[in-house]
Image (cartoon, grey):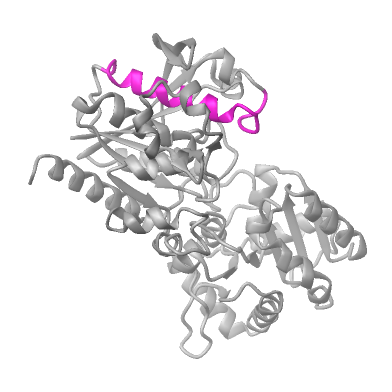
């Protein structure tokens, strides 16, 4: 039995700001269904989590760790939830706050978290960890600290990049102020005159993964590498891409209580859900009008600059469009006023509601995701679950999961375009309309969608193979 500890900053259902939480909330469950690996998860105990789960979590350990000159008290809580064992690192000074991220001392907060994780490892008598698997920059230092401070453990480590853009950068003086390490270790943390948590994870980990095969290749290039492409190329033999999956029971349109009308086996309830959503959001009620949607953060990465340039032109067609999300003021302001100009065709909902998001997935005919870059993307996978046709740019995990529909051989499960260009997006939107109005082609496309499956099983198999290869290499096999 290989024992793996996931280290991450968020996980559903405890706390969520993005796709990382979905992965950490579902991948361990998939791995724990196997009999050759056992996964537990450690997270910070934020105030939001404590408020919701304080009657369920139980105190497990207490000890102190140093961050610079500060001696911090640590309490570790634990909880068994959906066949997975969770630990929570608690400290009032760092985590009893209203928000999860966005503070000036975020770097220091996660230095503390990673130090506490390493200190906890030696105290897990019932779970001697074989592999430490850290996710994104907030957890990266747990790998560095374990390798430097506890070399006798011979702990194997995996570092997963969920989004290379966010790296956890601090001023160089923080090394002497906060890290409690000898000066000769700074080379593993420094990058371009600053401290970089992501770089520390890449430098110290035994294996590096990211969340799709295409993104694993893209990040080795200057364009996608976010300044770290050179170190990724140096370690190219240790870098691999394992495609994310989704929890298909959690996102099941046949049992989803958020839907006005859950799907039947033939998926024939989309029209009923569409009419209910149209009425709810003030759009003309007509199930025959093709409905295009975006459920997303309103940021440049998600392709909103492209949508911004063509939305008024596309809305001259007989279509409806719904945008749900929050983000940059530029996009919030633009799409709010675009909805005012096109009130009978466009709804911009500036906020987020999980139940409304699911209603939008279930009601839509097309899910638009023209990302500038996309490490994996979960939204297009959810859309496919709800029989909404994805329209994507060919990048990262979007390229790996959506194959362009071919009307000649009736293959493909969506629509795609290669170049980050607004008129290429407009062209594929208009082409999707042609297919929508061709009953034969539309049925063929949906037949392909019905065969698409992105549960965690195949990805879990790939992670287990990686874990076993690390254990074998450690034993010299």
| Up-down relation of residue 89 to residue 425 (above or below) | above
Question: Image quarter for residue 361?
Answer: bottom right
**Which residue sits at x=30%, y=38%?**
32
Q: Which residues are magenta?
A: 98-124
> Which quarter of the figure has residue 271?
bottom right
In the picture provided, is 305 more to the left or to the right than 81? right
Query: Does the rendering let one see residue 84?
Result: no
Q: Is residue 391 above or below residue 129?
A: below
Residue 4, given in percent of the width and then of the height, sits at 28, 34
Query: Within the magenta stretch, is there residue 214?
Result: no
Identify the residue shown where x is 45% and y is 12%.
74
In this view, 218 is above or below 182: below
How far from the left and from the top, in percent, is residue 18? 58, 43
Counting every numbered tag in the picture gives 0
Along the horizontal axis of the image, is 294 left or right of 236? right
The residue positioned 25% from the left and 42% from the top of the image is 34
């Amino acid at each position: 039995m290989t024992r793996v500890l996931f280290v991450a900053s968020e996980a559903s259902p405890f706390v969520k700001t993005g796709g990382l939480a979905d992965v950490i909330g579902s991948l361990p469950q998939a791995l724990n269904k196997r009999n050759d690996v056992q996964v537990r998860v450690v997270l910070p105990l934020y105030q939001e989590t404590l408020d919701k789960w304080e009657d369920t979590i139980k105190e497990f350990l207490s000890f102190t760790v140093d961050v610079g000159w500060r001696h911090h008290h640590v309490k570790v809580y634990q909880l068994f939830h959906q066949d997975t064992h969770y630990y929570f690192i608690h400290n009032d000074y760092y985590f009893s706050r209203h928000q999860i991220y966005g503070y000036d001392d975020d770097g220091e907060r996660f230095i503390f978290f990673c130090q506490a994780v390493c200190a906890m490892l030696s105290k897990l008598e019932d779970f001697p960890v074989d592999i430490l698997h850290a996710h994104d920059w907030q957890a990266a230092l747990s790998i560095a600290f374990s390798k430097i401070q506890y070399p006798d453990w011979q702990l194997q480590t995996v570092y997963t990049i969920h989004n290379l853009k966010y790296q956890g950068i601090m001023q160089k003086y923080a090394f002497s102020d906060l890290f409690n390490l000898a000066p000769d270790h700074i080379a593993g943390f420094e990058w371009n005159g600053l401290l970089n948590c992501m770089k520390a994870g890449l430098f110290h980990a035994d294996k590096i993964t990211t969340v799709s095969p295409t993104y694993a290749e893209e990040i080795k290039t200057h364009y996608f590498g976010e300044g770290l492409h050179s170190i990724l190329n140096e370690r190219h033999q240790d870098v691999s891409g394992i495609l994310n999956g989704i929890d298909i029971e959690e996102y099941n349109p046949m049992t989803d209580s958020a839907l006005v009308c859950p799907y039947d086996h033939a998926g024939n309830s989309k029209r009923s859900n569409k009419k209910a959503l149209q009425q709810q959001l003030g759009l003309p009620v007509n199930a025959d009008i093709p409905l295009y949607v975006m459920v997303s953060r309103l940021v440049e990465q998600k392709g909103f600059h492209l949508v911004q340039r063509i939305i008024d032109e596309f809305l001259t067609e007989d279509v409806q469009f719904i945008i749900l999300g929050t983000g940059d003021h530029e996009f919030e302001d633009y799409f709010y006023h675009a909805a005012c100009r096109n009130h009978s065709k466009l709804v911009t909902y500036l906020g987020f509601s999980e139940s409304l998001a699911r209603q939008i997935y279930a009601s839509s005919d097309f899910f638009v995701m023209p990302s500038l870059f996309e490490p994996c993307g979960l939204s297009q996978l959810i859309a496919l679950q709800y029989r909404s046709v994805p329209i994507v740019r060919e990048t990262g995990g979007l390229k790996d999961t959506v194959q362009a529909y071919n009307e000649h051989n009736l293959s493909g499960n969506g629509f795609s375009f290669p170049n980050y260009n607004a008129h290429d997006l407009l062209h594929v939107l208009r082409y999707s309309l042609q297919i929508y109005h061709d009953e034969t082609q539309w049925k063929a496309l949906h037949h392909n969608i019905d065969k698409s499956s992105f549960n965690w099983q195949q990805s879990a198999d790939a992670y287990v193979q990686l874990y076993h290869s690390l254990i074998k290499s450690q034993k010299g096999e």
